[in-house]
Image: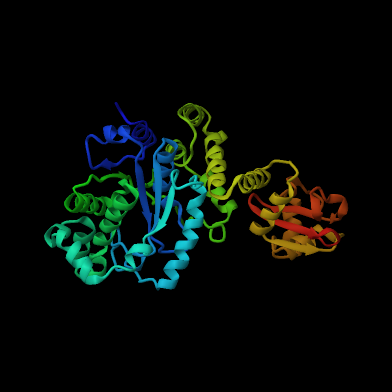
Amino acid sequence: MNSPFLEELRWRGFLEATTSDDLDAFLNEAPRTIYVGFDPTADSLHLGNLIPVMGLAHAQRHGHRPLVLVGGGTGLIGDPSGKSAERTLLTRELAEYNAAQIRGQLSRFFDLSSDDKALMLNNAEWLCSLGLLDFLRDIGKHFSVNEMMKRDSVRTRLEERDQGISYTEFSYMLMQAYDFLHLHRNYQCTIQMGGSDQWGNILSGKELIRRIDSGRGEGITFPLLTTSTGKKFGKTEEGSVWLDAKRTSPWQMYQYWLQTADADVVRYLKLFTFLERGPIEELAAEVASRPEQRTAQRKLALNCTALIHGNDAAEAAAAASRILFGSDETPGAETIAMLRRELPHTEVEPGVSLVDLLVHTRLAESKGAARKLVDGGGVYLYGERQTDSRKTVSADDVKWPGGVVLLRAGKKNYHLVLLAPHAA
């Protein structure tokens, strides 16, 4: 009988490879403790980390115990997997800070109300106190250098003569294998999951558990995701899309998902939301029949932003997006606050002429250009086209709380105008 958990992963597109043909039976025998590790190379996770996070969250939803491991120890070494050059080594203080930040982000995805439901650990607790001689004698003797050099993460670097690989990074797989052994011994953890680039590290841990404790450890890997155009998922021209709201705001997060291509949106709904098969199939039909409606993208953006930043922030981002794309709804306080953070804004006195306002807000280079813009029908207040270049903007024009006026020039050039007596 197939494991419901593995069936979920298969249907959603999470499953790249497993270390055993009878993993379904192993998962069906009893609830398992399953771990994923995250090294604190930055003070925030990014969207590329979401696949293992979501995979582990599905494990909990199917009755298994997720073990989230933050690599405060291994982060001091640096994983060579997928890297063409040596990482910059973190200081211990920075690794501890990053680990604490990441723990807070990961806690949103799991029920951590008791150790029976989920665990969140930091491998600095056991790795930083290891003695070198004991580690080499007890753990290192079980690793063949010949076999280690066959691993993709090592072989690729050795073939690049200009880069090579340091002994520090070469030892990373021993550290990660020891993590699996430690978690197996102390927390009955029997499965490690990770990206396909972690296959060699997972096999090393599985083999170490078998050799030292005659125990069973298994692995599951996820595919490394790219968009339908071959672009790396979770990247924009500005860089990574981060889970930390200070790095990537809820509005920016919402917009990233909203811009998902039709060719990718159904796949992303499976991977990055907890929507069931029926609703996703309905959205897939919408994409096929009415792609211009962008219904699936809006659902994806709302669900993913809520998952990362909470429902209130997601609803505010959705409302802000609707307003900027033509809705005449009146925004609430949180949506206005979000727009003020994301859009340029200027405080002015009531009674300013529209022409002067366009120049003042730099939506027009000169009064002549401003008049031409208005006369050409390219200026809007709250989506209403303005055609009178002699118009003044007064309190009578205010439709939003706090004296906030939405000014637009052309299709996408927005500016918030705060009329002084009402401005916050």
| Front one among 354 and 31 | 31
Q: Is residue 309 left or right of residue 260?
A: right
Residue 187 spot, x, y in % from top left: 35, 50
Residue at position x 80%, y 60% from top?
423
Say if 169 sits above or below 391 in the image: below
Q: Position of residue 155 (x, y in %)?
A: 18, 60
Q: Is residue 183 left or right of residue 95?
A: left
Q: Is residue 229 visible?
A: yes
In the picture, the quarter occupied by the C terminus is bottom right
Measured from the top left, where is residue 209 in percent x and y? 22, 51
- 127 up-or-down from 182: above or below: below
Q: Residue at x 49, y 43 (%)?
A: 260
**Which colour style is shown?**
rainbow
Does residue 238 appear in the picture of this structure?
A: no
Rendering coords of residue 188 (x, y %): 32, 47
- Looking at the rendered image, the quarter that the N terminus falls into is top left
Residue drawn at x 39%, y 46% is 229
How many dots with numbers?
Answer: 0
Q: Name the one closer to the observer, 48 or 18.
A: 18
